[in-house]
Structures are given as C-alpha cells and as structure tokens.
Amino acid sequence: MIRPLTPGERGLAEEAFGDALRLDAIRFLPSPWPFDRAFVPGRWFGREWIVWPRRTLPSDVADAPLRTQAVLVHELTHVWQAQQGVNLLTGKLRAGDKPASYEYPVGMDCDWGGLNIEQQAMVVEHRFRLLHGEAAPAPADFYDRVCPLGPRIKT
C-alpha cells in the first residue's frame, strides 16, 4: 500500500536533514519481486517516491533497526538531491552501481560538490550512523565539514 512518511519517519528525516527536505510529497511505494532494495526514481505525478521492497518495508522505519533507518536516510538523500534539481537517472548512470561508486575519499580534499549522488548519500548515511553511536569511515569533524545537511555532530 502506498503511504506517506509516518511521524516517526518524519522525525528521522528532520534529524538528518533539518528543514532542507520537503517531506509532505514523499511517498513509499512497496515494490514486488524482483526489486530487492530500495531506490528513488525521482518525482512522478507530484510526489517524491521511495520504492522499497514490499517484504522488507516496515510499517514505521523509525521503529526498525538502525541499519534500516540508515537506508531510509540514504534514500532520503536522493529525494533531497531530486528536490535540488538533480536528475537521478543521469546521476546514477554517472555514479555507477559498483561498491566503489559508494566509496568517498576521507580527507581534507573531499568536497560535497565533487561527490557523485551515491557518495553524497553515503556521507549522509554514515553521518546518521555516527550520530547514533555506530562507527563510520571518518571522524565527526569530517562530516561536519563535508555534509551541508542537518545539525553539527556534538562530540
């Protein structure tokens, strides 16, 4: 069943993005087999869609394990990118879908604008995980410097 974000999911989005993400038009679209992972196709019919495998879509991602919440944050990054005018299809074609497509450089030379759409989504996802006590590839100051979204990490 197509559904909007729950209040708990909206809270996760606000935690990760502050007020940078327009939430009212976002909808989950449960997908049948053969789709086995979540993705954001972009805006259709006035809505921002997150296609999520039906068998793994919880009724409220906010009540799911942290790794599922982190996937939502990753996909919401793609929604944010689309809201900023990024064409997700060409962005995905440029980024690719190999493991290296999701890896980002950790260092002073890393810049948000130089990252592909998957690298940006991983930065936001890892920042979210770090905020919740999980390990991330870089320290908090890296995410505060590189990621333009959400509040600063308190260390």
Image (cartoon, rainbow, N blue to C red):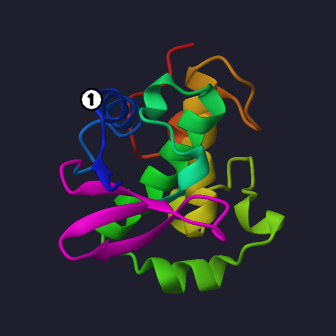
Compared with 96, 36 (above or below) is above
Quarter of the figure with the N terminus: bottom left
In the image, is 95 to the left or to the right of 62?
right
In the image, is 99 to the left or to the right of 17?
right
Residue 87 position in % (x across, y down): 41, 81
Foreground: 35 or 38?
35
Residue 53 position in % (x across, y down): 57, 57
Residue occupying the point 38% across, 60% down: 79
Total number of numbered discs in the rendering: 1
In the image, is 140 to the left or to the right of 89?
right
Compared with 53, 58 (above or below) is above
Foreground: 131 or 22?
22
The span picked out in magenta is: 23-50
Residue occupying the point 64% across, 59% down: 37
Residue occupying the point 57% across, 58% down: 38
Furthest residue to the right?
A: 99
Task: Count neighbours of disc 1 (C-alpha within 10 A) and say few if under 14, some if 14 to 19, many if 20 or more.
Answer: few
Residue type at tag 1: Pro
In the image, is 26 to the left or to the right of 104?
left
Residue occupying the point 81% across, 66% down: 100
User: Is residue 27 highlighted in magenta?
Assistant: yes
Residue 13 appears in the figure:
yes
- Asked which secondary structure carries label 1, the reply is helix
Residue beneath label 1, please? 7
| Picture quadrant of residue 41 | bottom left
Compared with 104, 151 (above or below) is above
Residue 111 appears in the figure:
no
Residue 101 position in % (x across, y down): 74, 68
